[in-house]
Image (spheres, rainbow, N blue to C red):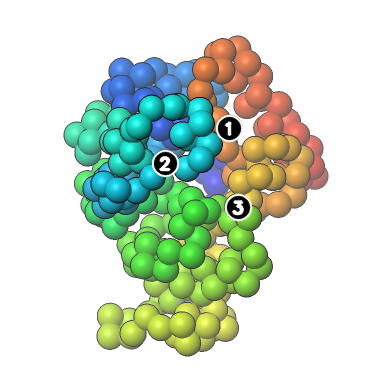
Amino acid sequence: MSADRKDSVYIIAEAGVNHNGSLKLARDLVDVAAAAGADAVKFQSFRTDDLVSQSAPRAAYQAENLGGSETQREMLRKLELSFDDQRGVAAHAAKAGIEFLSTPFDLASLDFLVRDLGLSRIKLGSGDLTNAPLLLAAARTGRDVILSSGMASLDETLTALGVLAFGYTAGPNDSPTQTAFGRAWDSERARNAVTTHASRRNANACQSSATSCARATSPYIITSPVMDTPQCALTFEVQAIRTACCWTSI
């Protein structure tokens, strides 16, 4: 996978679910990211009913910060953008001259991003690094994959890379098994496919230090959160990251 920019620094403005379910706010986040000079703005694509059950409780920190009796499902539903909304945001991003990206959390959302929106690359979150069905489906699309490793162990990361290797190179009649994943990662052809299509991003390194991020990834892929950050502050951050990454790559 290669960054499009000549300086090999690819900066993603992390919008996530900071739109709070508002299409207008989502468009505003796109505008802020584009004006700041980011290469892409990334959202999250999910269908609440495919992720959590009605009885799923909120995490302890969510219950403490938000209070009330709202369930995890009810909370997530407020943060969900419909497929129609995402079409609108993607079109707005195209007009603003910034790449639209989104992290899928379920197979239907992945299919929508690839087949409907035609995204050329898929960003997968660290929480799904062990989600073999999603990794496999992403690789089988033939699209580039940006995979966050988060707090995963080296063994977990290598297993994930094996799943991607299998997905990029296996035939339609090959069965996806643990053994097959391991063999795929041992294959030079499959490793080359992963090198071409996939990039591992350590979220902690990227978000805490531009210098450590520049050393941790190739190509240099950096995520900068877009929340209530003033326009001038975000612009300065993007410029500072580019400077730091170019300096450390010399």
Q: Measure the alpha-carbon separation of dots 3 and 1.
A: 15 Å
Q: Is residue 53 visible?
A: yes
Task: Estimate how packed mark 1 is, as few (under 14), some (14 to 19) or many (20 or more) residues with alpha carbons within 10 Å.
Answer: many
Q: Is residue 105 above or below residue 33?
A: below
- In whole angstroms, how far apart are the C-alphas of marks 1 and 2? 26 Å
Q: Is residue 212 left or right of residue 197?
A: right
Q: Quadrant of the C terminus?
A: top right
Viewer-proximal residue, 220 or 109?
Answer: 109
Three-letter amino acid code at disc 3? Answer: Gly
Would you say the residues marked 1 and 2 are in contact, meaning their CB atoms lie under 8 Å apart?
A: no
Residue lying at the far left of the rendered structure: 84
Label 3 vs 1, first from the N-terminus: 3
Residue at x-position 40% and y-position 72%: 167
Depicted 89 relative to depicted 212: above or below: above
Residue 192 showing in the rendered view? no
Query: Quadrant of residue 206 in the image?
Result: top right
- SS of the residue at dot 1? strand
Viewer-side label of 1, 2: 2
Q: Which residue is mark 2?
A: 58
Tag in front: 3 or 1: 3
Q: Which residue is mark 1?
A: 224
- To which residue does mark 3 refer? 150
